[in-house]
Amino acid sequence: MALDNTKSTGFTHVGTTPDRPDGVDKVTGRARFGADITAPGMLHAAIVRSPHAHARIKRIDTSKAEALAGVKGVVTRADFATGLTGENWNILENVMAGDTALYDGHAVAAVAATSSLIARDAAKLVVVEYEPLPHVTDVDKAMAADAPVIREGAADTSVPKGLHPNVVRYHESGHGDVEAGFAEADLVVEDHFKTEATHQGYIEPHACLGTLGGDGKGELWCCTQGHWNVQKICAALLGLETANLRVTASEIGGGFGGKTAVFIEPVALALARKTNKPVKLVMPRADVFKATGPTASTSMDIKIGMKKDGTITAAQGTFRLQGGAFPGAPCEFTAMCAFAPYALKNVRQVGYDVMSNRPKQAAYRAPGSPMAAFAVESVIDELCNRLDLDPIETRLKNASKKGTKASFGPTFDRIGLVETLEAAKAHPHYCAPLKPGQGRGISCGFWFNHGGETAVSLALSEDGTAQLAVGTPDIGGSRASMALMAAEELGIPYENIRVTIADTATLGYNEVSHGSRVTYASGLATIQAARDAVKKLCGRAAAKWGIPEDAVKWENGCAVPSGPNAGDFDPLPIAEITKRMGATGGPIVGHFEATPEGAGVSFATHIVDAEVDPETGKTSVVRYTVVQDAGKAIHPTYVEGQFQGGAAQGIGWALNEEYIYGEDGRLQNALFLDYRIPVASDLPMIDTVIVEVPNPGHPYGVRGVGETSICPPLAAIANAVSAAAGVRLRQLPMSPPRILEALEQQRNG
Amino acid sequence: MQYHTPASFEDAAAIAAQADGVTRFLAGGTDVLVQLRADIVTPDTLIDIKGITGTRDIARNPDGSWQIGIAVSGAEMTEHPALGRDWPGVVEATDLIGSTQVQGRCTMVGNLCNGSPAADAVPAMVAAGITVTVTGPDGTRDVAVEDIPTGPGKTSLAKGELISAVHIPARGDHGGDAYLRFIPRTEMDIAVVGAAVNLRLEGDTITEARVSLGAVAPTVLLVQEAADAIIGTTLDDAALAALAQAARDACKPIDDKRGTIKFRTHVVGVLAQRAAKIAYERAQKAGK
Ligand SMILES: Cc1cc2nc3c(=O)[nH]c(=O)nc-3n(C[C@H](O)[C@H](O)[C@H](O)COP(=O)(O)OP(=O)(O)OC[C@H]3O[C@@H](n4cnc5c(N)ncnc54)[C@H](O)[C@@H]3O)c2cc1C
C-alpha cells in the first residue's frame, strides 16, 4: 500500500551527510551517559549475585551489611510488588530472585550506601544460604529427558505434549509438501549446526539514578533503548501508577537490543523508596556479562533439496534456542527468517524455546535471524559446491521478490533482494582473485523490520527554528536523520532543527528503539508532524492574506499562493510567520501519533574473503563487502555505519565470541579479556554498497537498516572459512582450536 | 592500605620486610591496579618504586651488555634507538603487552614478577639469558630470569625482596632472537602459547641456542632439548621437526577457556619453528 504524498527524488537535505547534532557533545565529553547523572545526597548501590547456576535460596541475612557504617538500606525480593503475572513476573524474577537462584549472577539482594566502595563491601556482608540444585546450560541437554527442570509449568499452550518441561514455546510454519519436494531433488543435504550465546558487548554498562518518595512519585534517569518501556515495567514491579514515574533516557553508549530490557532500574527505585534518597546504580562489566542479555545459543538441523540447475525443491529446518532461565528465546523469528530470502514451493520450519540455567536472553540485532542464516546459507553453500553452481546465480534463481509467498506466510510487496544480489555480482570484490589459503563466502540475510507505537512533536520557535521532540533514544545517529527529514519538509536549514529525546512526561508512548524502527517510524512521524506544522503555517499566511487555507502552499521555507488564481502575494518566510504566532493564534506545534505498520522488510548480501592458517587454525578476514537494501538512505554515511557495525559484530560472533560455561554451570569469561570481541586491527576495511528499493510504506521509502546487516555475516564468514580451510565448519565460534580439530578430523577421514 | 614512595631499593626492601599482610610493588601498575579494581588482590601495603633514581634509565655498558631500569616502560624500550637492534626479540615481546596506553606504563619486571605463565616478555627474557639483581634486607644477589617464577602468581623472591635492575647480556656476533605468541585476535589478548628463540651462528651453523616456551606449563620453560635439537644444524627441515617435537614434549599445558591441551601442544611446536626461523634470519643478517 503506497502512502499519499510519497517522495523519492528531488531531495534537498535527505541523502546529504552533515555531522550528527550530538557529535560535538560526544567528542567533548558534554554528553551525559547513564553513569554521568548525579543528584545531591545520592547513595550508591551494589547488587549481591548468586555464585550458583541453580540453587534454592534458604535464607538471606542482611544484618551484618546493615550494620556497616554508611549503609542506608538493603532490599530483597520482599521489597517488590507481589501478585504479578506473565512477562512482568518473569522480569521481576530476573531482576531479583524469588526462592531460587536460576543462573550464575542472578541478583538476590541489593545494598545502598554513601559510597560505591562501602556498597561493594556491604554486598559481601550479605549472607545468603543456598542449597545447590542440579543445573543445565546446553540447549540440547536442557531438552533431554534427564535434564533438571528449571521451572514446572513455564510452558505455554503452543508446546506439543510429551516434550520436556524446559521447552516452553513451540513454533511451526511453512507451506507445500517438503517430502514431495525432497523426492524431486537431485541432491539433498542435511546437516546439524550449533552456535554459542554472544553478548551485545555495548561499551557502556547499564547505569541509572532513581528517586522514589513515600507518595509513590519518582524520577528515573537511565541508559536505555526505550524509556516508556522502563516506565511501564518499573511501575508494575514496584506497584506504582505509571504516570507518577517520569523516566528520562540518557545518552546511550551502545545497546544493540540489549538495552531494550530492564535489569537494574527497579532495584535502584526500590532502594530509593527504602532509603528516601536518590540511588545510583552502575553495573560492573562482569555483571553486565553475567546478568544482562546475551543472545540465545542454538542447535539447528537443516535439510535442503536442490535440482542440478540450482532450483531449491524443498527446505526444512529445526531450530532449538536456549534463552536462559525464562521463556523468550526468539525461536519463531529464527524459524521465520531462516528461508525468507527464497521463493520456495515446499518449506517447513519448527522452533523450540528452551529454558536453561543461564541469564535471560535479550534481543541482539535481528534476534534469531543471524543463527538461522548461518545454518541455512551453509547448506546452500554446500549444495552449490557439490553441484558446481555459482553461489550468487543460485541465490538469484531462487530469490524472493514482489509477489513471492514468503516462507513464513505473507506475500512480499516490493523488496530488494534481487537488487542486492545483482549489485554483489557486479562488485569488483566478487571476481577478485584469491591468494592461496584464502576462501570466499557469500550469504544473504533477512529481517522483518518494525513500526510500533510512535509519538513526535515539533514546536516552532519565534525565529523560525524548530524543536523536534522524539521518543526513541538515538542509538545510531537517528537525530541526524530526523533533522534531515524535518528540514526537507519545512524547507529550513538542517542546523535550524534541534532534536531532543523527550522524557516520558512530554510525549505519548513510544515503543523502544528496536526492530530497526526509528528512522522508519519516528522518521515517518517527524515528516507527518512537520507537515502538520506546515499546514498550520499555511493557515496563518492564508489568514494574513485573506484567502482560503487551501490556496496556500509551502515552498522552500515560505508560504506562497498555490497558483495565479490565489492572488499575488510575496512569499512569506517561516520566520515572518513565527515572529507573530502569539498574536495570530498562538504557538505552532506539529505533532503525530500512530502505530505505523508499513515497515518494509529488508535483505542483504555479504561477500567475505577469509584466510586460515592451517598450522594454528587462526582466521583473518581479509576483505568484506556489505550490500544491503536501505529503501532510502536518509543519511548515507550513518547507513554505512550500520552496515559496517553489523559486519564487525558478526565477525566477532563467527570467530571468537562465546559464553563459556564450566562443569559447575558458572560463566568462565565474564570479562572482555576472555570474551573476545574484535579489536580494530582484527577488521578489514568493510566496503559497503547501499541499494535503494523504496519501501512503499514510508513517505521517502525508508527501510530500517540496523539489524539486517548482522544477518548474513555468520554464514558468509563460515562459508569463506570453510572454503579456505577445505572443511565445513558447523559450529560457532570458529575458534582456532575448533578449526584445527576439523582439519584433523578431515585428515583422519 | 598503606602507600609508600621510598627513595632507594634498600628502603623499599626494609618497608616490605616489615609489612604485614599483602604487599605489592607498584611499577607500571597495569597488573596491580587491575587486580585491585577487580577485587582479586587488595594489597595492605603498596610500595611505589618508580621514584627511585635510575629506574627509568636504559644504559649500554662498555662490554655491550645492557642495564635496564625496573620502571622502564614498554614504549621506552621500543623507542630506544639501539636496544631493539641488539635484542629485537626482547623488545618485540615487551611491545606485545597490551595496547598503546598499557605500553606507556607496563614494565618487563612487572611482567616477570606478576608470575603469569603467559607473560609475554618473560620467554624472550629467558631465551636472551637475562639476569636480574634482587635487593633484600640482607643485601643483593643476581638471579637468572628463569629462576624467578615458581608457579602461577608465585616467584622465588622472599619477603622483603625486590628486583632492582635488569641485565641483558652483550649481543655478540652473529646472534638473533625472536618471540612469537598465539592469540585468537591481533592484539589486546593473553598468550595461549608463546615461544622465544635466541641463537648464534658460525657461518650457517647454529652454535648456541636457547629456547623458551610460555603459557604451556605453570611457569615459563627453558627447554634444553629444544635448543639441542637445533644446535649444530643449519635449521634444516629435520632440525625444525626435532625442535617442534622437543617443544611439544617439554610442555605441560592445561585445558582451559583459552585453549585445549591438544591445541597448545600442537601450536607450541609451530611457534617454536617460526620463531627459530626469524631468529636464524636475524642472526644471518647481523654483523659482527
Ligand atoms: C589492557 C591490558 C592488556 C594487557 N596485555 C598483556 C599482554 O598482552 N601480555 C602480557 O604479558 N601482559 C599483559 N597485561 C598485563 C600487564 O600489563 C603486564 O604483566 C605488565 O608487564 C605488568 O607490568 P607493570 O609494570 O604494570 O606491573 P605492576 O602492575 O606494577 O606489577 C606487577 C607485579 O609485579 C610486582 N613487581 C613490580 N615491580 C617489581 C619489582 N621491581 N620487584 C618485585 N616485584 C615487582 C608487583 O608487586 C606486582 O605483583 C595487560 C594488562 C592490561 C591492563
Image (cartoon, coloured by chain):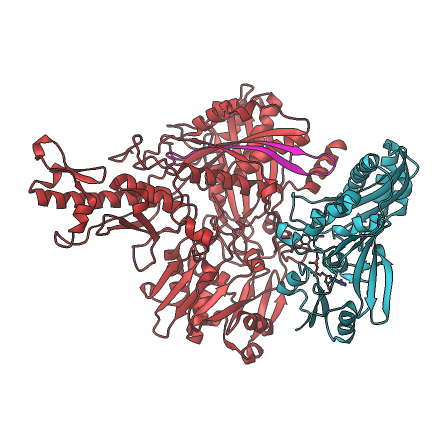
Chain colours: A red, B cyan
The image quarter containing residue B54 is bottom right
Q: Quadrant of ligand 1?
A: bottom right
- Whether residue A185 is visible, yes or no, is yes
**Residue A638 position within the rendered picture, expressed as x and y whole percent measured from the top left:** 43, 40
Q: Residue at x 86, y 38 (%)?
A: B288
- In the picture shown, does residue A497 fall above or below A346? below
Magenta part of the chain: A609-633
**Residue A284 position within the rendered picture, expressed as x and y whole percent measured from the top left:** 55, 61
How many numbered marks does the figure carry?
Answer: 0
**Residue A51 position within the rendered picture, expressed as x and y whole percent measured from the top left:** 62, 64
A373 part of magenta stretch: no
Q: State the quadrant of the N terminus of chain A.
A: top left
**Residue A417 position within the rendered picture, expressed as x and y whole percent measured from the top left:** 44, 29
Q: Nearer the viewer, residue A29 or A298?
A: A29
Q: State the quadrant of the C terminus of chain A.
A: top right
Q: Does B271 sit left or right of A558 as displayed?
A: right
| Most distant residue in the top direction | A309
A627 part of magenta stretch: yes
